[in-house]
Amino acid sequence: MANSSLRLYLTLLGCFLLAGIFLIVAQQGCGDLSGEVVSLTVVPSTKTIGINQSQVFQAYGVDVSGNSVTPSVTWSLEGNIGSVSSNGLFIANGTANSGKIVATTATAVAARASVVVTYEGWIAGNVKDELGKTVPGIKLYIPGTSSQAFSDSNGDYSISQVPQGTYEVWATDPRTIYYDASLEAVVSSGETVRVDFTMIYYTKPTDIPTPTIIF
């Protein structure tokens, strides 16, 4: 009986010791996983950049606990679009192309951002009348080209795919309520130049106050 009790005691003791060993291995043997990045995002995720221009990209991660972290990453490129430094500074080539910026952690978690390198730019702005009210339906165009747009209900417009250069932008009203107007725009590749118009009435509305002349 004594021997059976001893054997039972030793068996239970062995089980407790093994359980303790497994617990230590589970807590320490696999390493400290806290802070390990499980997902990664590159910001901005998409970018159109003018030739020979630069843009800083940043990588943000989420660890196993769901916490936001700023991980250490290696930067690289997919496609012949330029160069990228170790801190995420991208410099575009002198030719138009498209590709990706890639950020990769030491544990091979990777994320990408799409990049378009372009010669072209944009002209955008707002159209108001001399009362300060927004004017929809105004045609904005560059003479001698197919580049044009119409102002929307908020008076906003945007002319895209404009090669870099200096242009005379015209605003005309198909309803012939306003005089035509023109302004100069200097377009740089990959950039948006803002050109706002104030349209002048052919016949001033009655709600425009008549100035008081003092003699």
Image (cartoon, rainbow, N blue to C red):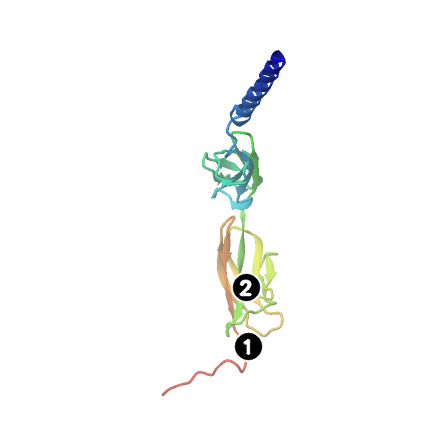
Question: Looking at the image, which residue sits at the far front?
Answer: 1
Res 13 quadrant in image: top right
Please name the residue that numbered disc 1 is placed on. Answer: 202
Circle 2 — which element? strand
The part of the image, by quadrant, that contains residue 205 is bottom right
Q: Nearer the viewer, residue 206 or 77?
A: 77
For the point 54% across and 29% down, the residue is 107
The spot of residue 175 in percent (x, y) is 62, 72
Point 61% across, 11% down: residue:
3
**SS under mark 1:** loop
Residue 170, which numbered label? 2
Label 2 sits on what residue type?
A: Trp
Who is closer to the viewer here, 37 or 140? 37
Q: Crowding at label 2, few (<14), some or many (≥20) Cα neighbours within 10 Å?
A: some
Residue 72: horizontal and vertical position, in percent? 47, 34
Distance CA(mark 2)–CA(mark 1): 17 Å
